[in-house]
Image (cartoon, rainbow, N blue to C red):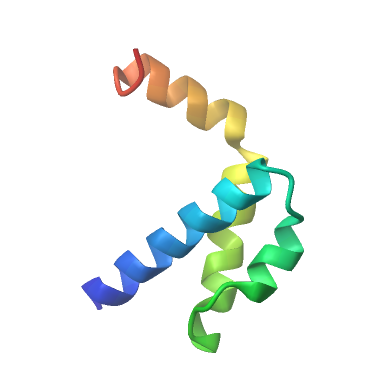
Amino acid sequence: MAAQAETLQQAAADVLRRSCRGEGTRQVLYAVNVPPAVKSQLQAIVLGCQNNEPLLWSVARDSGFMH
């Protein structure tokens, strides 16, 4: 289970990184190599991060993770 969570986290980071560089999020989500059973989880993580980006930056800054 931990290995699957790590794979999911790495895939989400890759999708977000690539979409920030200008690649379309949908295209990257469909192209990423993860098991079909976790595609919906990956999509939820990525879209959740994108939809809540300002809040996530604020929390990271206020918590001291970013200086």
| Camera-side residue of 24 and 66 | 24
Tell me where residue 10 appears, x and y as whole percent: 40, 60
Residue at 51% across, 56% down: 14
Residue, far left: 2
Residue, far bottom: 36
Placement of the C terminus among the 4 image quadrants: top left
Number of numbered discs overlaid on the protein picture: 0
Residue at 74% across, 64% down: 26
Tell me where residue 55 appears, x and y as whole percent: 55, 28
Placement of the N terminus among the 4 image quadrants: bottom left
65 shown above or below 49? above
- Residue 8 is left or right of residue 31, and the answer is left
Tell me where residue 9 appears, x and y as whole percent: 39, 60
- Residue 62 is left or right of residue 25, and the answer is left
Q: Quadrant of residue 64?
A: top left
62 shown above or below 43? above
Residue at 59% across, 34% down: 53
Q: Quadrant of residue 32?
A: bottom right
Q: Quadrant of residue 49?
A: top right
57 shown above or below 4? above
- Residue 40 is left or right of residue 13, and the answer is right
| Camera-side residue of 49 and 30 | 30
